[in-house]
Amino acid sequence: MAEESKGLTRAKEIYQDRSRRAKELKAQGKKIVGYTCIYSPLEMMTALDLVSYRVFGDMREPLTEADRGLPAAFCPIMRSCLDLGLKGRYDFLDGMVTAHACDPQEKTVHVWECLITHSYFHFIDIPGTLHEGAQEYFKGQLTDLKKTLESFTGKELSTEKLKRAIEAHNQQRALVRELYDLRKPDPPLISGTETLQVIKALMSIPVEEGSELLRQVISEVRERKDGPQKQAARLLVWGSTIDDTSLVGMIEDIGANVVMDDHCGGSRAYRTDVKLTEDPLDGLAYYYLVELVPPRTFREAVLGETRKDYVADLESRFSYLKDYAKGWNVNGVILQSVRYCDPHAFEVQGVEDYLNGLGFPNTYLEHDYSEGSLAPLRTRVQAFLEMIC
Amino acid sequence: MTKVVVMDKDESILACIVGPTGPEQRRLANKVMEEALQQAGLSFDEIDYVIATGYGRINVPFADRQITELTCHARGVASFFPTVRTAIDIGGQDAKGLKINDGKLVDFVMNDKCAAGTGRFLEVMADTLGLKLENFGSTSLKSTSKVKISSTCTIFAQQEVISRLSEGASLEDILAGLHDAIAGRVARMVQRLKVEPDVVLTGGVAKNIGVVKAMKENLGCEVLVPKDPLLSGAIGAAILGKELTLKALAKGEPVLKKERRLEEVTFFK
């Protein structure tokens, strides 16, 4: 048998055949729990020795079954997830932990529950604002999750186990940030395409294995001589989930380096650490409610203020993007979302205003979550590069 | 449509070809080029720089560089109207809004997903009404009370036109309504760029005086149209080619980075 592959090669293999490792682990008796977005607290699953596995769509797979459960004018990513579920692609999952990250997800979860049977199912409600009481309420939601996970596994989720799991996930977050730092040089040491493959691989395997993969990738990337070439454009890509390399691959093909990203198939799950609090659920509640940046949550500079200061609000919502743009020395930002992704589409105006205020050129692309729909975007990306270079 | 413009260093046009692209011609860019060379009385070796633009830009193997139509349009429009700030191009396939500053493209919006808001919308209607597209503009100006037609979908609008006809609406009023629908849709898209004058309308649809009028009404400002609105992209490409050539010469660098031959595109074989 060939030697087991490592680093970037291994990441690419997992990216291309995501469920292989999870199925191996299932055969060894482990339970696999699917999750649809980064709002599901993986730490609580890890603490109970469950393997968490991100449910993604597949933009290369034509939708043939989704219409059985979902309307046509609806989030194409959720449609694709359900389509794959109905085709049996997720049959190996023992359960699902889902969250009200956005309305399409909440609706899809109900339909999923109707049409696809798993032995365990849990849905977490997430408050839409950060007002007083929201965090306490959300902690209650995590307490409910703890109870159902305990009854599903027949094990107790002790404070000690949870703290150790939080540490393991924080370590992975730190490693991802270390990897992203390798995109700061010019040229970056790792391409946007390769980074996507690594992140998707992380979301498909247990946390310790993911961290080991990251260590291999980091040392390989530091040493290698065949990294990306220098390009005139260094781009930040923002928006809805990117779970396929085709869009970023196209951008990099045209002649740009994607050096930073802000979407939930990239940096969003790894931006900051979960604080280790006496009751670990406090740290988790704060992290998942306050620290995650997706646009689903209403944010403002001063809670409940009635006379709005737009500039201050933008700063409070998007200052992390300034850190990305400056820290990674980008000269352009591509805002992208799949069609019908309301949370991101509504956020575009604010992000544009914020970036324009900082002087970072940007362009907005909307696509249909299919490979074919990306081709016409080529002209826009190329024109954008002609504009900024 | 396929267009070729051959230009000298004083920006005088030596040859100009406009013709339908068609499925077969897509791989025969070399034939169109030969025709242009013949018109200009030049050999291919005498051409300093070739820029390919538009959807077909990847099908021109003898081009020295590909530049998107957005950049080329901006450059071309600015050469006719140096004070342009907003350019709107409505072609057969798509509609674009360009924000231009000092002759340079600084922002853009584009509709390339839907036939409504493109020249195709009017072509479909010409077919439905059994009229020649060329007569749309002048006929619509005779309208006394334009019919409201929804602009969200070409097929729905076509059904609306048929039902308005059966209700006895006049052709003039229907045409004025169609022009208002397409202009309104494109204007709303371009408003994302915060329209500033001078506003220039180009593309085949700009030849339709009815759409120009409707665009003025929708934007609430004057709308300029170049003499040959179909050629702004090709002229812009030629000017960019001239500029790249002069820049290379000024730096003492070779103008052409690779050998080129006037031959048909090979990847279709």
Image: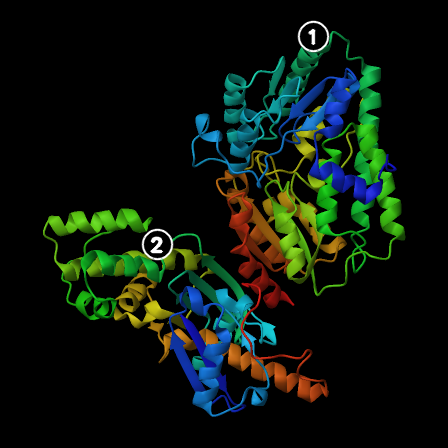
Q: Residue at x 58, y 22 (%)?
A: A125
Q: Secondary structure at mark 2?
A: loop
Q: Is residue A8 above or below residue A129?
A: below
Q: CA distance from mark 1 to mark 2?
A: 56 Å
Around disc 2, counting alpha carbons within 10 Å, would you say few (fewer than 14), some (14 to 19), or many (20 or more)? many
Quarter holding the N terminus of chain A?
Answer: top right
Mark nearer the viewer, 1 or 2: 2
Looking at the picture, tell me which residue is in the foreground, B211 or B27: B27
Can you give x and y, in whole percent of width and height, for residue A376 in the image?
51, 56
Q: Residue at x 44, y 70 (%)?
A: B25
Q: Residue at x 55, y 76 (%)?
A: B263
Q: Are the residues flagged by discs 1 and 2 in contact, CB closer than 8 Å?
A: no
Q: Which mark is residue A332?
A: none
Q: Is residue B61 above or below residue A105?
A: below
Can you give x and y, in whole percent of width and height, for residue A8 in the image?
80, 44
Q: Residue tagged by mark 2?
A: B116
Amino acid type of the residue that numbered disc 2 sits on in the rendered structure: Ala
Quarter holding the C terminus of chain A?
Answer: bottom right
Amino acid type of the residue that numbered disc 1 sits on in the rendered structure: Ser
Q: Residue tagged by mark 1?
A: A151
Q: Is residue A191 above or below residue B96?
A: above
Can you give x and y, in whole percent of width and height, for residue B186 in the image?
37, 58
Label tally: 2
* Chain where mark 2 sits: B
Can you give x and y, in whole percent of width and height, for residue A16 in the image?
70, 39
Snapshot quadrant of residue A161: top right
Looking at the picture, tell me which residue is in the foreground, A237 or B135: B135
* Chain where mark 1 sits: A
Around disc 1, counting alpha carbons within 10 Å, would you say few (fewer than 14), some (14 to 19), or many (20 or more)? few
Q: Do the residues marked 1 and 2 share a common chain?
A: no
